[in-house]
Image (cartoon, grey):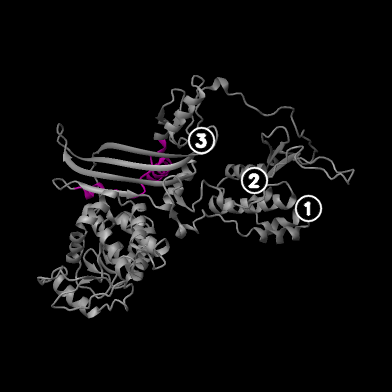
Amino acid sequence: MSFIACRWRQAADSLQAKDPDIKWHWRNLNTHVNLSPNYPVENDPLQVKVDDDIGIVPRPVGHGWNLFGLPGDSSPPSRFIRLFYLRGYAMTTNPPKSFDDAAVLGTALLNNVFIPLGTVAADPKKKSDGPELTDYAVLKSAQDRVMLIRGYRNSQWRKIDLKRLDFSQARTWPLEDGSLGIQDITDAGASSVPGRAFWLSVEKSEEELREKRREMGPAPFLALRYEYDNSAKWDPENRQKTKSPEEAERILRITGRLPRPLRLSDVKLGAPPLRKTIVATAKERRAAAEMAGIYSVSRLQARLLLHRELHPVWGHERVMIYGSMVSEYMMPDVFTNDPIEVSVPLKFKAAFREDAVGTSWAAPVNVSLFGESGCPDTIGFIFGALATAEQAKGVADIISVDWTPFGNAYFITKECGGVPAPPGCGTSTSCRYSSTTRSCYFKHCGLGGDPFPDCYGPGQLHCQHGSVECFANRIEACAKVRDPSGNWEISRCIEKAFYMGKLQNGKSSFADVTAVAERCGASSSLLNWCTEHGDDAVIAMAKATPPHPGVPYVLVDGRVLSDENDLLNAVCQAYQGPKPAGCPMALI
């Protein structure tokens, strides 16, 4: 196993592969090229909701499907395949950072190719063909000059430190020490060491244990442990680990943090309560499932109401947060391992007091984005320049996106003209879209204009890419009117479906858009409200859209962004506080 930190090609010379030979093994790797280190999402664009019992299909049920087809038998070709791909994926996604990490990885890989005595059938035609088993295993670290050895019966590693040996004298060690290496921890009780711990009770019946496990939910995280009193407690030893912001963030990520930044500075004293909706993306839901050790998370969202007030007794400012969170996930039954669908609603209230002493933070940079739903240029910017800027380290925390979904649409007016769209139109050409009419419209009816009497009806609303764009704009407009601070997460999710999901093919229906909106966090009450008040929401977006040459039209703190690809520089230049690490070095 010394090849853990080496390349396979370098280790090939030391492999004594005779049946088949080593070249055959290398060629055989090509037969499993379908394996992947990534979670299977290739079929997400095909997903449909069948009914409430079956849910959305096709979807991975649980984890491990990226390794589907990995052979599990004990033949030399299969063990070679397992070691190659498992080692490669582990080294790619979570490479060892220390000797201990490498030893853990090496142990896991060796366990995967371990041959128990009696499982491999002998060839009856060969009299000398005896039973096969894994007699012993060795891990070697050339850098530390250490060897780890274990036998067949005792799987506990024993270490030989080569730095302490006198190589002028021969030494031998027994392969087995006669024991099984089992440690009796009965009298040790509950562990005080931070980390995962198992939950045990001898006073509960099997049915009570099953019900209690369902109530407890996923396995405990790093900073939690379940003790004999069956309650979750914060481990006080972890408080000593949070002296640095980096370590605090690491523990918060492991124990579960909100997937979106929440700036309390956005909550103003005397202002109406701020509403915020947080919806976890598919990637974040997968990460949460992997972190919690459950099959899948189908829904994870929170709705918050934030209000700044004066403390009724002490008089200092505080921020009150009233929240409701919903998580829907599939987890294994603790006894049968069968998948169980769980839905957990949670309501909570919290109060925060900010320490303003020495604060050097500035207000976030406002990125005003004017576009239209499903427009190739608009979604290209959202998942291109904007995503690049937000992925730069620390930059997402200084950006506040203000999305206005109207773009190049316009109402047909007597003064600016325009031809009504024919029935069933779906493209700019067939709908006879007019950029001249659009320019006239926004000059008079957009932000800062002198509106005509018929600026917002009764003339027909004309969208550049057809009726589906109008419908998606309408839902996103309703989301913004109902929740000005939380609408962007819903809209971004819908636009992602146009970019690379269910709405990507350009032949979507209103029902398709509605289904995607529901998956993105649009509640039934929002959609019902939109049915009655959607026209008013669309008009509000039209009034808020300034004259523009095309979309996306972007303002960074009120200044027009002339080059869409320069968003990162523009945001970093506009930010008045300490520049985050993701900003170009010349600006830091």
- Give left or right: position of 346 versus 271: right
What kind of element bears circle 3? loop
Numbered tag placed on residue 333 in the rendering: 3
The residue singled out by tag 1 in the image is 16
Q: In the rendering, at what x and y percent does residue 359 appear?
A: 25, 47
Q: In the rendering, at what x and y percent does residue 280 appear?
A: 37, 50
Kindly check if marks 2 and 1 are in contact, taking CB atoms under 8 A apart as contact.
no
From the viewer's perspective, is the residue at label 3 or at label 2 nearer? 3
Q: In the rendering, at what x and y percent does residue 92 appear?
A: 56, 54
For disc 3, the neighbor class at 10 Å (few under 14, some 14 to 19, many from 20) is some
Q: Is residue 241 magenta?
A: yes
For disc 1, the neighbor class at 10 Å (few under 14, some 14 to 19, many from 20) is few
- Give left or right: position of 44 versus 552: right
Q: CA distance from mark 2 to mark 1?
A: 19 Å
Q: CA distance from mark 1 to mark 3?
A: 44 Å
Name the quadrant containing residue 588: bottom left
Task: Compare marks 2 and 1 and give the one earlier in the sequence.
Answer: 1
In the figure, 180 relative to 138: above or below?
Answer: above
Which residue type carries mark 2?
Leu
